[in-house]
Amino acid sequence: MNAEAKTSFIGLFPLFDMLPEEEKARLSEMMEVKIKPKYSFIYMPGDSSEYIFFLAKGTVKIG
């Protein structure tokens, strides 16, 4: 995903509406895109909570 696509993706979340475009661009530079196979884990108990996850596609089961 290129920087422009990342910035557009960030724009899908109302949480970031208040940010100026420059800040959205900075977020997109820090953003990592990961593709996970079905039934894989994105977080396990005990993992550090340094990241926040946003789904572009699919579903997540919690619990």
Image (cartoon, helix red, strand yellow):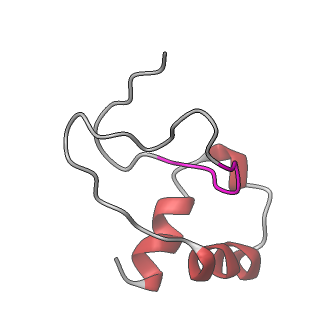
Residue 33 x %, y %: 41, 67
Between residues 47 and 11, which one lies in front from this camera angle?
A: 47
When asked about the image quadrant of residue 39, the answer is top left
Looking at the image, residue 27 lies above or below residue 3: above
Quadrant, the N terminus:
bottom left
Residue 39, compared with residue 62, is above or below; it is: below
On the rendered structure, is 12 left or right of 41?
right
Which residue is outermost to the left? 38
Q: Residue at x 19, y 39 (%)?
A: 38
The percent coordinates of residue 51 (x first, y second) are 64, 55
Question: Vertical placement of 31 versus 10: above or below?
Answer: below
Q: Which x, y percent locates residue 12?
A: 51, 52
**Which residue does the image show at 58% across and 32% down from the upper left?**
45
Which is nearer the eye, 16 or 39? 39
x, y percentage for residue 30?
62, 77
Horizontal relation, residue 55 to residue 36: left or right: right
Q: Which residues are magenta?
A: 48-54
Residue 60: quarter of image:
top left
Residue 52: in magenta span: yes
Q: Main secondary structure of the magenta part?
A: loop
